[in-house]
Amino acid sequence: MTDSNKNWSIEDSLHTYQVKRWGEGYFGINPQGNLSVYPTKELNGPLIDVQAVIKEIKKEGLGFPAVIRFHDVLRSKVKNLNNTFSQTIKEANYKGDYYGVYPIKVNQLREVVEEITDIGRDFHYGLEAGSKPELLTVLAYNHNPNALTILNGYKDKEYMRLAMLGTQIGRNIVIVIEKFSEIYSVLEAAQEFNVTPIIGVRAKLSSKTSGKWSESSGDFAKFGLSITEIIELIELLKEKNKIDWLQLFHFHVGSQIPDIRAIKECLTEGARIFANLVQMDVPLKYIDVGGGVGINYDGTNSNCSSSTNYTLKDYIGDVIYIIKDVCNIHQIAHPHIVSETGRAIAAHHSCVITNVFGKVNLTRYKAIDTSKNPHDHHLLKNIKELYKDLNHSNYQDIYNDACVIKDEAIAAFKLGVVNLTQRSQIETLYWNICHQIINMTENEKYVPVEIKKLKSVLADKYLCNFSLFQSAPDAWAIGQILPVVPISYHNESPYIECTLADITCDSDGKINHFLGEDGHRSTLKIHDLKGKEEYYIGLFLTGAYQDTMGDMHNLFGRLNEFHVYADSDDPNGFYIEESIKGNSASDVLEIMQYNSKEMCKKVKNEVDQQIKAGKLKARIGVKLNDFYEACLNNYTYLGNS
Ligand SMILES: *Cc1c(COP(=O)(O)O)cnc(C)c1O
């Protein structure tokens, strides 16, 4: 242990990485200093040491990066949502029931959907689909006779006919009308299959939400009917004597809604429309409040787009009490409540583990001779003086002057006035000045923006074996902050500041936005790699949208995946129920229309020609062919040897 570790405790680590806030009690650090999962949220309950899981994965012979799914967390989330709804319904003396549905677009993986429907059986918890492939899935997997199957998204005739098939096999299918003309294909398909469908209608609310998905609401939203269209729909159904088909009223105003006030406004508007429709003799039974419950990714508990200023419990309370109040005012019966909460169910259950395989720093602080030399070029002479003069009161001024000298030196180099050695000396001094300024301003309350930026640029880059585009697309596409935390060594001080770089050949493949004790930071506090043979970092809360939306930039494919359950009978406290091998190189190449057999043949031809020409020994040629073929069957990420 170095001196800096004496004053470092696990509590400090919990605070540095805000584990308690984003972890919601599911994550913590065990006394050995390893990040751990607490499936029951009890500190003295069952615990899964993530470092121990990593060890077991290595024993199985599969490499990193890897997705680890904690199925107990998923189950707990489903239970918690349903129990909180039913408790609050009781407390509020609300007369309707809760019928939740899980929107499978959030994470369509079969094992995830199976786990959710399994634990959801006790709660008549159903599924939601938004496309034909998703509909095919929910038809096969929503076995619960009491649960709902909600169908959203734009629908063609085939979609409608599949929905009728669902009704015929006994499912409680609700076809939500997203655009007016869909009603005609419902009428047509219902006649063709001779079934009485249940339909819903999605409204465009005028209330606006904040956050990255605010355009899902308002007059110009992509989905839903305007108030005028809804009234027309009702007239049409009444005219055709089919108004009893219309049983559900739906709105969905966006995902990751950070501000509870926006949610309250939408609920109030939605409930008002609902009540008015009932008073117009529409026999509505369900009010479907959509999704949108956000995740406190950055631990700030704020209304910033990576956070939420409310809890799930607050949200559920608002849903029930607002609907109840509006219904009481209008003196109508309390409807059953449906929610399509997705992100808040799936986000916590999975994480991505990557191994750090090195670090780079192009601007290393380096001792350099700064004594006066009569032969120095005047630019070098000047920057030496700046370096000597630098102090606490003039650093901003010196920084600006140093930047000018560096630019001039490069211009002079291009003109042949400054030579390569001189340029190197000037650049080194420039970076030394920058590093000194950063050290000087370390504990300062106010640091100018350009100096802050400098800090992120100068930080070490830890190279991580993963692709941001495959594993955390939202961190790239919309600047979503995800908790990034080292897996072990939490007994040591993470005194190094770094940013992370992935292995894609894309300058965007980096993470330089992190959570911190007082809000967002441009660098991550991390341990020194010295003396550590292996070092693992976890990207957490990736269970919603991330791993199913990732792409194959640079042909990095799907990750190895491990499904973990807590088990009190196991000496390690857990077991890996399933290992799913990630894509091999040939898997991803085949998606791009290549044929790996063909590729082997092509390489073999070249090898044969070299042998014929006497440039290669036949024995070596065979080895080369085998090696090429083996690589095609291997993982797309960096190997560990
Ligand atoms: C995406 C979506 C959801 C899920 O939203 P979350 O924010 O993940 O809870 C629910 N309903 C509809 C119609 C959606 O499009």
Image (cartoon, rainbow, N blue to C red):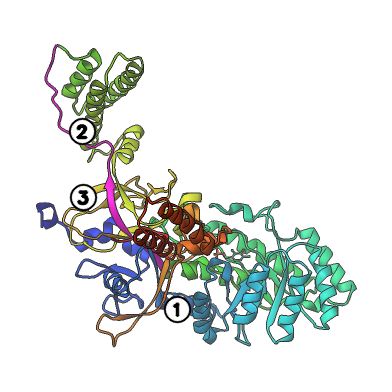
Q: Is residue 483 magenta?
A: no
Is disc 3's CB within 8 Å of ligand 1?
A: no
- Point out the stretch of residues depicted in magenta: 350-374
Label 1 SS: helix
Give the amino acid type for the residue marked by disc 3 in the picture.
Tyr
Q: Which residue is mark 1?
A: 75
Give the quadrant of residue 507.
Answer: top left
Give the amino acid type for the residue marked by disc 1 in the picture.
Arg
Horizontal side, residue 438 vs residue 478: left or right: left
Question: In percent of the image, x 28 and y 42: which residue is there?
Answer: 459
Residue in the foreground of this view, choosing between 332 and 179:
179
Q: Is mark 2 in CB contact (under 8 Å) with mark 3? A: no
The answer to whether residue 546 shows anywhere in this view is no
Label 3 SS: loop
Name the spot of residue 580 as percent of width and height, x first.
43, 73
Question: In percent of the image, x 68 and y 82: which residue is there?
Answer: 172
Give the amino acid type for the residue marked by disc 2 in the picture.
Gln
Q: Which residue is mark 3?
A: 495
Horizontal side, residue 98 vs residue 81: left or right: right
Identify the image quadrant of the C terminus.
bottom left
Q: Residues within 10 Å of mark 2 (few under 14, many from 20)?
A: some
Which mark, residue 436?
2
Q: Residues within 10 Å of mark 1 (few under 14, many from 20)?
A: many
Gap between marks 2 and 1, in whole Å? 51 Å
Tell me which label, 1 or 3, sits earlier in the chain.
Answer: 1
Residue in the foreground of this view, choosing between 157 and 211:
157
Gap between marks 1 and 3, in whole Å? 37 Å
Name the spot of residue 191 as percent of width and height, x first.
85, 79
Give the quadrant of residue 152.
Answer: bottom right
Q: How many marks?
A: 3
Tell me which label, 2 or 1, sits earlier in the chain.
Answer: 1
Q: Is residue 373 magenta?
A: yes
